[in-house]
Image (cartoon, rainbow, N blue to C red):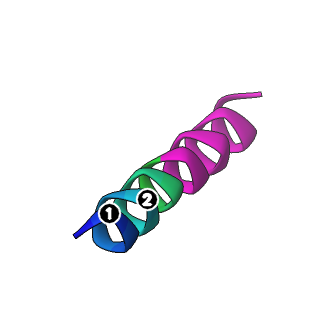
Amino acid sequence: MCKYIKKKSLTAHSQTNHTNALLN
């Protein structure tokens, strides 16, 4: 369960970085 949450938050973080890259 802990691994799943960690992986999920990592994915969300990557998507945020990707969105920022598109905006900049």
Q: Amino acid at mark 1?
A: Cys
Q: Amino acid at mark 2?
A: Lys
Horizontal side of residue 9 vs 5, given as left or right: right
Q: CA distance from mark 1 to mark 2?
A: 6 Å
Q: Which residue is mark 2?
A: 6
Q: Residue 19: give x, y in percent of width and height.
A: 56, 41
Q: Residue 2, labelled with which disc?
A: 1
Q: Residue 16: give x, y in percent of width and height.
A: 54, 40
Q: Quadrant of the C terminus?
A: top right
Q: Quadrant of residue 8?
A: bottom left
Horizontal side of residue 12 vs 17, given as left or right: left
Outermost front residue:
2
Q: Residue 21: give x, y in percent of width and height.
A: 74, 41
Q: Residue 10, labelled with which disc?
A: none
Q: Are marks 1 and 2 in contact (CB under 8 Å)?
A: yes
x 65%, y 30%: residue: 23
The magenta stretch is 13-24
* Residue 22 forms part of the magenta stretch: yes
Q: Residues within 10 Å of mark 2 (few under 14, many from 20)?
A: few
Horizontal side of residue 20 vs 10, given as left or right: right
